[in-house]
Amino acid sequence: SCLICVTKFVQVISCNLPFLFGASVASFITSCCYRLGNNHSLTIPQRSYCDNCHCILRWWHLIPIFSFIILRGQCFYCKQKISLYLPVIEFLSGIAFTTFLIYEPIHDLIILLFLTSLIFLTSTDFFSHVIYSYSLLGLFPITLLSIPQNYFYNLIFACILVVSLLLFATFTKTLGIGDIEFLFITCLIWGWYQTLLIIQWSSLIMLFIFVFTRKKKLPFIPALSLVTILCLFIQGC
C-alpha cells in the first residue's frame, strides 16, 4: 500500500512539474525585481526576508502560492500584508509554463526565455514603474515559433505606432517610454493588427482595474503581458 501511495504521489508531482517550475521561476524573479527596484542587494542577505521586519523567512514561508494561503496573506513574524501580486503572478506563470512547454528542447528554451522576460518586465513595472530596455531582447526569439511575418512592413508600422503613441503620451501623460518600447517590439514581432488588439484589450483591463482601485498611476506592462500571452496561446505556439 505504501508503494502504491508513493507511486501516486510521484505521478501527481510529475504531472504538475511544469506548473511548479513556472510558479517557482516567477517567485524567484519577482523577489529579484523587488530588490532591484528598491536598490537592495541581490545577494545580501542570500536568503529571502520580510521587507517590513527584515526577518529571514523559513523554507515553508517560500512555497509559491501555498505559503500565501497558509500564512493568510501576511508575514509570519510581523503580520505585514503580503502583496496579492505574488500569488497571482506565480499562479499565472505556472499555468503558462504548463500550457506552452511541450518537452522539445529548442521550443521550450524559446518559450522559457520569452516567459521569463515577460515576468521580469511585469514585475519591474509593478514594483517600481521601471522598464529595463535590455530585457525586451528576450522577446525576439519567439519569432521562430510565430506565424511568419513581413518584418519590413512590421518595422514601418512599428515606427508609425511609436510616433502616434509618443504624441498620445505627450498630451495625456498616460503612457511611459517603457510601454511604448514594449509595443514597438510587439509590432515588430506580430504586426500592426495583433498589436492593436493587444492595446485594445489591455486598455480595457486597465480601465476595469482603475474603476475598482481609483489609482492614478497603474503599471501597464502587466496587462500588456497577459494579453500577449493569450495571443500566443491563440496562435498555438
Image (cartoon, helix red, strand yellow):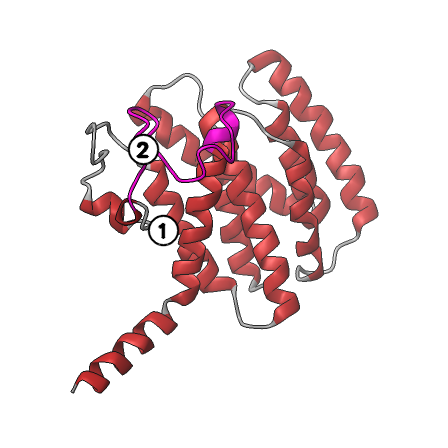
- First to last magenta residue range: 34-58
Distance in Å between CA atoms under marks 2 and 1: 14 Å
Q: Quadrant of the N terminus?
A: bottom left
Whichever of labels 2 and 1 marks the residue nearer the N terminus, that label is 2
x and y percent of residue 124 in the render?
A: 51, 32
Residue beneath disc 1: 91
Residue beneath disc 2: 83
Residue at point 65% right, 25% down? 165
Q: Quadrant of the C terminus?
A: bottom right
x and y percent of residue 63 in the render?
A: 31, 50
Q: Is residue 188 magenta?
A: no
Q: Which of the two residues, 109 or 183, is positioned nearer the viewer here?
A: 109
Q: What is the chief secondary structure element of the magenta stretch?
A: loop
Left or right side of 42 for 132: right
In the depicted structure, whether residue 175 falls above or below residue 95: above
Whether residue 220 is visible: no
What amino acid type should be assigned to the residue bearing mark 2? Ser
Residue at point 22% right, 34% down? 74
Q: Secondary structure at mark 1?
A: helix
